[in-house]
Amino acid sequence: MVEKYANLSLVLAELIREQLQAKPDSCLGLPTGRTPLGCYQILSTWSANNQLDWSQARCFQLDDYIDVQEEFSFHQYLQDNLYRFTNVNPKNTFNPRHIADYDEQIASLGGLDLAILGIGLNGHIAFNEPGTPVASWTHSMFLTEATRDANSEFFPDENEIPTRAVTMGIQTILGSRRLVLVASGESKRDILEMALHGAVTVDVPASFLQKHDNLLVLTDFDINTEQLRAEP
Ligand code: PGA
């Protein structure tokens, strides 16, 4: 399993490296959570060794908590796990919490080239929880109890788990030229199957990804094949 997770992380890191080499000023949508940590470690090593240039890259975090102590914010997560090891220009790291019109900001820089997405056990992508309409742009919302529970390990005290967040919407995500959906661990198998092969429904926000014609799915467990392309 660890070996497979290491593989997944390397494939993902290589995808991001290729994207930055092909287009140094790429606009990237970057996730947080457990899944991308291995990939970020690899990218951090390459970057610290001057093997990867972020000087023109534009990094858009997918989402962040509202009303959270800065140390628990997703911006801080990206700072700690990736940005500080790279030469990314802080002016080119974007946080939806601090930008009034995130979609306009993304559009003004040419649109997202590549967005990396995790999937929640309830089918959320970024913080688009079940019930989020497909016609959604960056918005703030209340987190479900399931999501607050899933993220409780990152907080010392359950009272500190935020109740609200701001997230790219489904349209923001579908607007990216390329999407990579990453799922690690058997616990994600059922929801991933539903997202990729079930009905396209607001009950499983990740199912909207079936509408995208450049989606790559990476897993570290067997699901038909280890990497598969969803039907457009
Ligand atoms: P995880 O989170 O990588 O920590 O499992 C994924 C998500 O909730 O989007």
Image (tube, grey):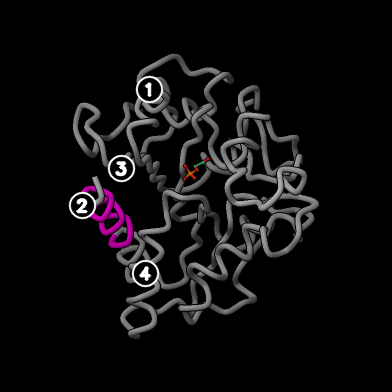
Q: Is ligand 1 closer than 8 angstroms to the Cβ of mark 2?
A: no
Is 69 within the magenta? no
Nearer the observer, disc 1 or disc 2? 2
Q: Quadrant of residue 91?
A: bottom right
Q: CA distance from mark 1 to mark 3?
A: 15 Å
Q: Quadrant of residue 78?
A: bottom right
Check the image and report above or below for 91 versus 225: below
Percent from the top left, x then y, of residue 31?
A: 51, 52
Identify which residue is drawn at 44% across, 53% down: 114
Question: Which amino acid, mark 2?
Answer: Glu
Q: Quadrant of residue 40?
A: bottom left
Q: CA distance from mark 1 to mark 2?
A: 22 Å
Q: Secondary structure at mark 1?
A: helix
93 relative position to 86: left or right: right
Instruction: Tell me the crowding category of disc 3: few under 14, some 14 to 19, or many 20 or more residues within 10 angstroms, Cα based.
Output: many
Q: In the depicted view, which residue is nearer to us: 90 or 40?
A: 40
Query: Could you say which disc has been placed on residue 43 in the image?
Result: 4
Check the image and report above or below for 191 versus 139: above
Instruction: Count the numbered circles shown.
Output: 4
Q: CA distance from mark 3 to mark 4?
A: 17 Å
Query: Could you say which disc has been placed on residue 3 in the image?
Result: 2
Would you name the residue on which mark 1 appears? Answer: 190
Q: In the image, which residues are magenta?
A: 3-14
Which of the marked residues, 3 or 4, is nearer the chain's N terminus? 4
Q: Secondary structure at mark 3?
A: strand
Query: Could you say which disc has been placed on residue 93 in the image?
Result: none
Identify which residue is drawn at 25% across, 50% down: 2
Nearer the observer, disc 4 or disc 1? 1
Which of the marked residues, 1 or 2, is nearer the chain's N terminus? 2
Check the image and report above or below for 127 versus 160: above
Percent from the top left, x then y, of residue 201?
A: 53, 17
Would you name the residue on which mark 3 appears? Answer: 218
